[in-house]
């Protein structure tokens, strides 16, 4: 304490006094202010406490944390004091660090659900307190997408990862196709309305009268419709014209019979009253058909436009006894034990009784004789029919025979064939035996036909004679000019079944190799030898043409050689100039060279000339160094490139690489047979320096019992030496303070930063999630605990990171490691689910033509769908009018019945051509892994237009589904539409990329670790060949592991 000045003294004198400094008694320090970078932590996360306001003093933390301006801490309450030479301050403000729960699933929305053209859709996630990670691996609270597909997101923060959000389905849109519109009537009267229905539009229908919706009711007028979606408006649909109805015309009535007997009745049917009501005379009431007794009947047609005039009159009389039937026979003549078949007609609704005690029936098999029949009905028995007489048959007629050829030679044979003996046996003359065909030699032949009625007269005669000698063959040669020992090949044709004989004693055969000369041939068969063929002359060829020569290089140095190659001497020998000898290639020195070609026809003229010259000196090489600084006695490697000869260095060393240990400038030259290059670039080698201090980090600042922290040093190009005496870039240590130095051949660095490892506390509670929170029957829920570096113990006594539970209740988990046991996790509550709700039915149509079908579909059932017909499945086809319901059954029970859908059989718009068959639809693929083009093809619509369930039209269309999708089609001909085709499902099996994790990425030799994979709906396959969501590995060296997700045939 005191007041002080200073002066400066040198040989010139003493300066005046300096400024004054006063040292006084300082005050005790004030309490510091502490702050934290976060107020909540998760799992093994740490918060960083920072103290300010203690300039020149030492910060001391509560809870035995020690001294320092910053500390990394877990959950708890903390204060600090400031100590200086003047004393210790009071406690600072208190900071409390709490534990945070895992994030909840975000809620995602889309700016629109259908992409049109190249536009972008914005996906937005809310309710996330961390980072939003999307299913396409993008991050951020909002992203833009241009691809169709299913999108979801999770929320990640230091407390873990949330479950998946809701799923947003984005589809590819397009300007829609024109819809198809139909009407239940084309005329209306008074205030009656026609019902217009539009189909084939998955969006909004806009009608030409300004109305919207799939169904409207209209009066007189002309109507069209368009389909509108976010991508635009379709072209107009087909036109429907509703006109004013007129008073109906008289219906036409008919009867299935005009006479009845006893209690019989006739059925009257009325037609020509579409959309109206038939009223019958005589108080019979209304309806299109009536059963009546004898009498006279008419009918009228009543519609909203009035009542028609009376129809035609139909009179039903009392019937008479039936007329005599008519009988016929399949043959009137039979032989042996054959029978004829009698058939009676003209006894509709009655019974035929045959004469001769043959009994009753419309047909009888009989022998020869005369037969009649009567018809018995409710009105009595008819007179006797016409008589049919069956007689005994006659002997067969003579057959007709033909031959496949009438002239043969030598051992040849002809084939005889007989016809006209149906049901009989052919017998040949000359003892040839029986059968419809025979192979014979020359001669004259006949045949007879034998049946049950006898044997026929003799057939026509066929004569087979001996054939003629063969014609001369034709000969040809593959070449007409040859040289030396060459030969030509002669070929003869036109001697089918015979033998070729060559002139000049060449012998027989269809081909011959010959020298120069003139040649002919003959053909010999069983019928003789042909005249001589045409003559072929083979002449001697010409001398060869000069060959072409080329060189692989035209410039050489010293003892180098160039390779000459000659072409264009096929079948000959190359001879080189300058006494080089023969052969297609030669290695030569500098000079001028030619070649000739020698064949059996002579020697060619000289080839082109090739000149080989002497080359130039080499270019300078390029020199590089492994490093540019030398420390101590270490060596540096110099490398030269770009030299086609020998590298010679400035220090007199040779070779493409040399090692040097002296500082200095180094260069090199390239020497070859053509000379010596100029100097290369210069590489400067200098003396290195002592290294800088390294930087050290740790994977943890707290350890328990025998646990170790992992220290890693970076920034050292030499050897790391630790304050413990250990060496190496990484060591494992217990509690204590640690530094490191970097040592190389140039010296040892200063000490690094200080790392302090302290004794840790018990672990934080794990984070528990369930794959479902509601179960039924034998269902089970999977509970998974994360963020535990020890053993997970569950409140039901089980252990492990994942367990399955089948009982409703509240479940928690704790984490135990060498530092102790955590507090219990947040509870997950599993409840018992309720019975499913009633499904909703949709119908492809509620009014169908007779014989057509409607498709009933339902979704929203996570169990088995059972229809009121007894059928099961998400969709069925029905053809019968009636009321249909459906219910859903799963492990939680059976739902109530759905609201009924009523199917009616319509009587309008079902005229000629409307009973179209259902199409048959097929897909080029029914299972895909990612969205790809699939071709759908429909068959069975030859004269109409095919309209698909997605609004497209054409016999085949290309689709690119992003999710599993079903397709069907109908055929439209004029105003008629076929039933819906079979349904084709294209299944999209997406295999999403899994997320992999492990408790730590650093282990000691001999230790094992569990690898886990998440977000896979299939089978996890690891890069080391193992499978499963969790696998245990024990690597012997630093290893990398990846995983893929396999779903069916698809792999992520």
Image (cartoon, grey):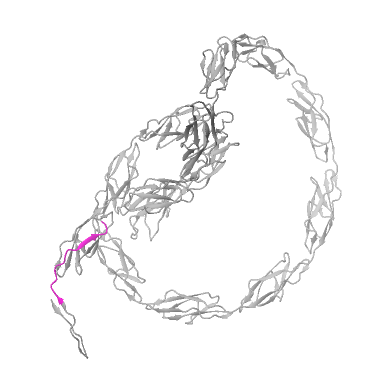
- Residue drawn at 45 percent across, 31 percent down: 871
* Residue at the outermost bottom position: 11
Residue 782 appears in the rendering: yes
Relative to 759, say whether 262 is above or below.
above
Q: Is residue 491 shown above or below 350?
A: below
Is residue 314 shown left or right of residue 418? left
The quarter in which the N terminus is drawn is bottom left
State left or right for residue 409 relative to residue 155: right
- Along the horizontal axis of the image, is 604 left or right of 151? right
Magenta segment: does it hold 634? no
**Magenta-tinted stretch:** 22-38
Whether 35 is among the magenta residues is yes
Q: In the depicted view, which residue is nearer to us: 911 or 432?
A: 911
Q: Within the image, what quadrant is residue 247 found in?
A: top right
Q: Nearer the viewer, residue 905 or 839?
A: 905
Q: Is residue 16 above or below residue 41?
A: below
Q: Is residue 984 visible from the viewing direction of this image?
A: no
Q: Position of residue 937 (x, y in %)?
A: 55, 41
Give percent across and percent down for residue 815: 27, 51
Percent coordinates x, y for residue 318 in the rendering: 59, 9
Magenta span: chief secondary structure: loop
User: In the picture shown, does residue 218 fall above or below 817?
Assistant: above
């Amino acid at each position: 304490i005191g007041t002080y000045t200073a002066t400066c003294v040198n040989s010139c004198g003493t300066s005046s006094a300096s400024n004054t400094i006063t040292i006084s008694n300082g005050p005790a320090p004030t309490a510091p202010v502490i702050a934290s970078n976060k107020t909540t932590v998760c799992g093994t996360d740490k918060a960083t406490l920072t103290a300010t306001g203690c300039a020149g003093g030492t910060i001391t933390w509560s809870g035995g944390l020690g001294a320092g301006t910053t500390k990394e801490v877990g959950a708890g309450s903390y204060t600090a004091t400031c100590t200086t030479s003047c004393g210790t301050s009071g406690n600072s403000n208190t900071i409390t660090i709490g534990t945070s729960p895992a994030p909840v699933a975000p809620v995602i929305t889309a700016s629109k659900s259908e992409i049109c053209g190249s536009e972008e859709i914005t996906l937005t996630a809310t309710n996330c307190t961390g980072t939003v990670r999307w299913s396409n691996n993008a991050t951020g609270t909002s992203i833009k997408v241009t691809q169709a597909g299913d999108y979801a997101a999770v929320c990640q923060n230091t407390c873990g990862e949330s479950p998946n959000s809701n799923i947003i389905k984005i589809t590819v849109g397009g300007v829609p196709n024109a819809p198809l519109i139909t009407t239940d009537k084309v005329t209306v009267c008074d205030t009656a309305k026609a019902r217009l229905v539009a189909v084939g539009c998955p969006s909004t229908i806009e009608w030409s009268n300004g109305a919207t919706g799939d169904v409207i009711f209209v009066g007189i007028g002309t109507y069209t419709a368009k389909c509108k979606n976010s991508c635009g408006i379709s072209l107009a649909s087909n036109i429907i014209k509703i006109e004013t109805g007129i008073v109906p015309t008289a219906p036409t009535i008919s009867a299935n019979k005009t006479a009845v007997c006893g209690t019989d009745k006739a059925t009257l049917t009325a037609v020509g009253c579409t959309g109206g009501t038939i009223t019958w005379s005589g108080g019979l009431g209304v309806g299109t058909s009536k059963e009546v007794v004898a009498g006279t009947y008419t009918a009228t047609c009543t519609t909203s436009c009035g009542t028609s005039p009376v129809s035609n009159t139909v009179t039903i009389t009392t019937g008479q006894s039936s007329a005599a039937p008519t009988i016929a026979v399949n043959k009137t003549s039979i032989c042996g034990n054959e029978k004829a078949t009698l058939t009676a007609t003209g006894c509709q609704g009655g019974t035929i009784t045959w004469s001769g005690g043959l009994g009753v029936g419309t047909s009888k098999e009989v022998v020869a004789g005369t037969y009649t029949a009567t018809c018995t009905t409710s009105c009595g028995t008819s007179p006797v029919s016409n008589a049919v007489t069956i007689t005994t048959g006659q002997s067969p007629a003579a057959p007709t025979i033909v031959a496949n050829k009438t002239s043969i030679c030598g051992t040849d044979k002809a084939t005889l064939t007989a016809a006209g003996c149906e049901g009989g046996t052919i017998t040949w003359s000359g003892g040839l035996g029986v059968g419809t065909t025979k192979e014979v030699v020359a001669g004259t032949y006949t045949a007879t036909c034998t049946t049950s009625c006898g044997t026929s007269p003799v057939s026509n005669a066929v004569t087979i004679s001996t054939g003629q000698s063969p014609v001369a063959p034709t000969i040809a040669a593959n070449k007409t000019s040859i040289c030396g020992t060459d030969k030509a090949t002669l070929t003869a044709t036109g001697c089918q079944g015979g033998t070729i004989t060559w002139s000049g004693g060449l012998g027989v055969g269809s081909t011959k190799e010959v020298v120069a000369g003139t040649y002919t041939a003959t053909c010999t068969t069983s019928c003789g030898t042909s005249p001589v063929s045409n003559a072929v002359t083979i002449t001697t060829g010409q001398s060869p043409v000069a060959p072409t020569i080329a060189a692989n290089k035209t410039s050489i140095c010293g003892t180098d050689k160039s390779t000459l190659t000659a072409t264009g001497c096929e079948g000959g020998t190359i001879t080189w100039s300058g006494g080089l000898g023969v052969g297609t290639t030669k290695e030569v020195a500098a000079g001028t060279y030619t070649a000739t070609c020698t064949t059996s026809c002579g020697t060619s003229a000289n080839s082109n000339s090739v000149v080989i010259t002497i080359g130039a000196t080499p270019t300078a090489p390029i020199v590089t160094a492994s490093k540019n600084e030398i420390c101590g006695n270490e060596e540096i490697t110099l490398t030269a490139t770009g030299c086609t000869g020998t590298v010679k260095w400035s220090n007199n060393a040779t070779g493409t690489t040399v090692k040097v240990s002296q500082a200095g400038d180094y260069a090199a030259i390239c020497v070859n047979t053509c000379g010596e290059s100029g100097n290369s670039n210069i590489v400067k080698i200098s003396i290195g320096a002592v290294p800088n201090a390294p930087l050290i980090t740790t994977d943890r600042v707290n350890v328990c019992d025998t646990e170790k922290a992992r220290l890693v040093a970076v920034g050292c190009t030499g050897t790391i030496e630790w304050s413990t005496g250990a060496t190496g870039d990484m060591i494992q240590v217990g509690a204590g303070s640690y530094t490191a130095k970097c040592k190389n051949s140039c010296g040892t660095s200063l000490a690094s930063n200080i790392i302090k490892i302290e004794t840790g506390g018990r672990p934080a509670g794990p984070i528990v999630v369930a794959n479902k929170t509601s179960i039924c029957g034998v269902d089970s829920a999977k509970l998974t605990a994360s963020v535990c570096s020890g053993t997970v113990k569950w409140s039901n006594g089980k252990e492990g990171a994942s367990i399955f539970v089948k009982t409703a209740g509240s479940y928690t988990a704790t984490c135990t490691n060498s530092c102790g046991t955590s507090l219990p996790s947040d509870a997950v509550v599993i409840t018992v689910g309720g019975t499913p709700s009633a499904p909703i039915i949709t119908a492809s149509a509620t009014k169908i033509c007779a014989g057509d079908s409607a498709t009933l579909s339902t979704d929203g059932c996570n169990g088995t769908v059972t229809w009121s017909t007894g059928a099961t499945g998400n969709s069925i086809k029905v053809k019968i009018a009636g009321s249909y319901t459906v219910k859903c059954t799963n492990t939680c029970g059976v739902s109530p019945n759905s609201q009924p859908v009523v199917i009616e059989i319509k009587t309008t718009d079902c005229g000629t051509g409307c009973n179209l068959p259902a199409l048959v639809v097929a897909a080029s693929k029914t299972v895909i892994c990612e969205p790809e083009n699939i071709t759908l093809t429909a068959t069975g619509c030859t004269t109409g237009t095919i309209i698909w369930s997605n609004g497209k039209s054409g016999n085949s269309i290309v689709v690119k589904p992003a999710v599993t999708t079903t397709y069907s089609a109908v055929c439209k001909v004029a105003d008629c539409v076929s039933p819906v085709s079979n349904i084709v499902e294209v299944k999209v099996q997406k295999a999403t990329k899994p997320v992999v994790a492990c408790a730590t990425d650093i282990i000691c030799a001999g230790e094992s670790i569990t690898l886990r994979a998440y977000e896979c709906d299939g089978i996890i396959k690891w890069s080391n060949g193992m499978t499963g969501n969790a696998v245990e590995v024990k690597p012997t060296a630093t290893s990398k592991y990846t995983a893929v997700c396999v779903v069916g045939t698809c792999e992520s």
